[in-house]
Amino acid sequence: MLGSTRRASAGWPSRNATDLRSAPIASRLDASQEVIVIEPSLRADRLRRRSPNWIRVKRCTTLRYISSQPIRIESETLDALRERSAQSGEPIVRLAQRYIEEGMRVDRHPGIIFRDGPAGRRGVVVGGPDIWEVVAAARSAPERGEELIVALAERIGVPGEKIRIAVRYYAEYPEDVDRFIAAVEEEAQQLEQTLERERRLLG
C-alpha cells in the first residue's frame, strides 16, 4: 500500500516534500513494521490521493486529533491493539489514547496500575488498595499529617509507603479520583434504595 504525504496548510508544519521524504521514519521502515500516523484533521484516503509517491508502508492507520507526529508501532503491538479493541468494543483510537495516558501516569507514579471494575476503570496501588479507598478513608479519619499515614496503613493493613503512593497520585490527579468516589457513592446509594424497597415490599 502506498503511504501518504502532507502539504503545508493551516495547522500543519511548513516542511517541504523533500524534507518529509528524507525524514528518519521513512528510512527505517521495513516490511515487518506498520505505521500509525496520528492526524488532527485530514483523512488518510484524501492524503493518498494528493500524493501517491511519498512513503511506502505496509499499512497506515490514522489516529486523528492527538498530534501530527508520525508514530511507528510494531505489527504485533498494532494487532494486539486491534484485538483488544474488538474484545472490549472500545474504538481503537480511544483505546490507544487511554493506554498512552495510563502509561505516562505509571511512569510518573511507580507502584500504580489500572484495573477495570463494576464502577469503571480506576488506579490501584500494586499489592495494596484502590487509590479512591485510601482517599475516602483519609477524609473520614481524625488524624492529620504523618499520623494519618500511619493510621491508614494500620487500618488498611499495608505498609505506609503504599499509602504515600496513593496520596501522591491523588495530589496530581484529584479530579479523576474524586469522580470515581462520587460514582461509587452514587452506586451504593442506589443499592441501598433498592434494598429498602425490597424490605418494604416483604414487610
Image (cartoon, rainbow, N blue to C red):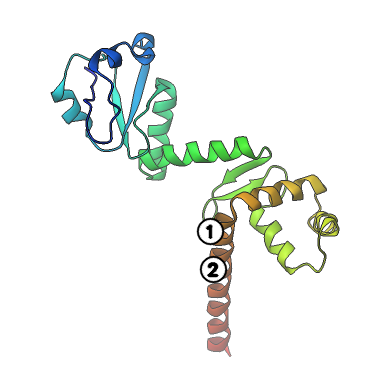
Q: CA distance from mark 2 to mark 1?
A: 8 Å
Task: Pinpoint residue 48: horizontal percent, then vertical percent.
Answer: 18, 24
Q: Quadrant of residue 64?
A: top left
Q: Could you tell me which residue is drawn at 38 percent across and 13 percent down?
A: 24
Number of marks in picture: 2
Q: Residue furthest front?
A: 14
Q: Is the residue marked by circle 2 packed among few (<14), some (14-19), or many (20+) residues within 10 Å?
A: some
For the residues bearing labels 2 and 1, Cβ distance under 8 angstroms: yes
Q: Which residue is mark 1?
A: 119
The kind of residue tagged 2 is: Glu
> Of the residues under marks 2 and 1, which one precedes in the sequence?
1
Q: Could you tell me which residue is drawn at 55 percent across and 37 percent down?
A: 104
Taking depth in this image into account, of 14 and 101 the one nearest to the observer is 14
Q: Secondary structure at mark 1?
A: loop
The kind of residue tagged 1 is: Ala
Q: Which quadrant is the N terminus positioned in?
A: top left
Does residue 23 lie above or below 119 as drawn?
above
Q: Could you tell me which residue is drawn at 54 percent across and 36 percent down?
A: 103
Q: Could you tell me which residue is drawn at 58 percent across and 61 percent down?
A: 178
Q: Which mark is residue 61?
A: none
Task: Pinpoint residue 81: horizontal percent, then vertical percent.
Answer: 42, 32
Q: Quadrant of residue 14?
A: top left
